[in-house]
């Protein structure tokens, strides 16, 4: 194991309503879920590793929270959709020249922070789209 990097394998979010949170992300990104059992723990299957989890918590998220980054083709489109579903804008799309990327971010209705990332493979620095 000494020659291997210790990979991140899972991210887990507490939620007062795992079913509603799962439906939010299914509608926003098209992700699927393994409800085991429904309403208590939902494994998020975003299509690539690492998977995510949503677990039932009596207390809502508070204080500093992890931030996940999701690759999308148009951050403003996904940001507007997330906001229409109850999310709060953390920031509108901006450029990150060091990475040749554009990104926007929101806080979902349960307190998780999500950055919508458009990578340098689809974004050309200096372009408006």
Image (spheres, rainbow, N blue to C red):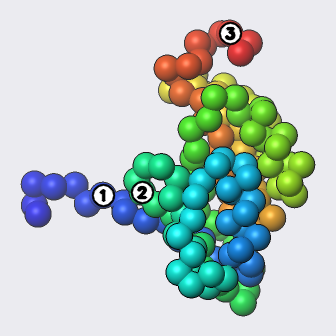
List x then y, in percent, for residue 52. Answer: 51, 64
Task: Return the residue found at the far top.
Answer: 127
Q: Report crowding for label 2: few under 14, some 14 to 19, many 20 or more residues within 10 A (C-alpha).
A: some
Return the disc, 1 or 2, that comes first in the chain's sequence: 1
Q: Are marks 3 and 2 in contact (CB under 8 Å)?
A: no
- Residue 7 tag number: 1
Residue 15, relative to residue 95: is it above or below? below
Q: Nearer the viewer, residue 5 or 45?
A: 45
Front: mark 1 or 2: 2
Q: CA distance from mark 1 to mark 2?
A: 9 Å
Q: Report crowding for label 1: few under 14, some 14 to 19, many 20 or more residues within 10 A (C-alpha).
A: few
Residue 3, relative to residue 123: is it above or below? below
> At 87% from the left edge and 57% from the top edge, which residue is drawn?
86
Task: Return the residue found at the far bottom.
Answer: 58
- Residue 50 tag number: 2
- Label 1 secondary element: loop
Q: Is residue 48 left or right of residue 73?
A: left
Residue 28, relative to residue 120: is it above or below? below
Return the disc, 3 or 1, that comes first in the chain's sequence: 1
Q: CA distance from mark 3 to mark 1?
A: 35 Å
> At 78% from the left edge and 32% from the top edge, which residue is drawn?
76
* Residue to which mark 3 is pinned: 127
Q: Are marks 3 and 1 in contact (CB under 8 Å)?
A: no
Q: Nearer the viewer, residue 18 or 32?
A: 32
> At 66% from the left edge and 82% from the top edge, which residue is drawn?
39
Return the disc, 3 or 2, that comes first in the chain's sequence: 2
């Amino acid at each position: 194991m000494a020659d291997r990097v210790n990979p991140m394998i899972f991210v887990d979010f507490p939620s007062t309503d795992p079913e509603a949170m799962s439906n939010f992300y299914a509608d926003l990104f098209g992700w699927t879920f393994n409800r085991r059992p429904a309403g208590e723990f939902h494994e998020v299957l975003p299509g690539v590793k690492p998977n995510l989890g949503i677990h039932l918590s009596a207390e809502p998220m508070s204080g500093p929270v992890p931030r996940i980054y999701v690759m999308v083709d148009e951050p403003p489109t996904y940001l507007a959709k997330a906001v229409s579903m109850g999310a709060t804008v953390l920031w509108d799309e901006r450029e990150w020249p060091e990475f040749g990327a554009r990104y926007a971010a929101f806080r979902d209705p349960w307190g998780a922070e999500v950055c919508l990332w458009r990578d340098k493979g689809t974004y050309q620095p200096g372009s408006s789209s």
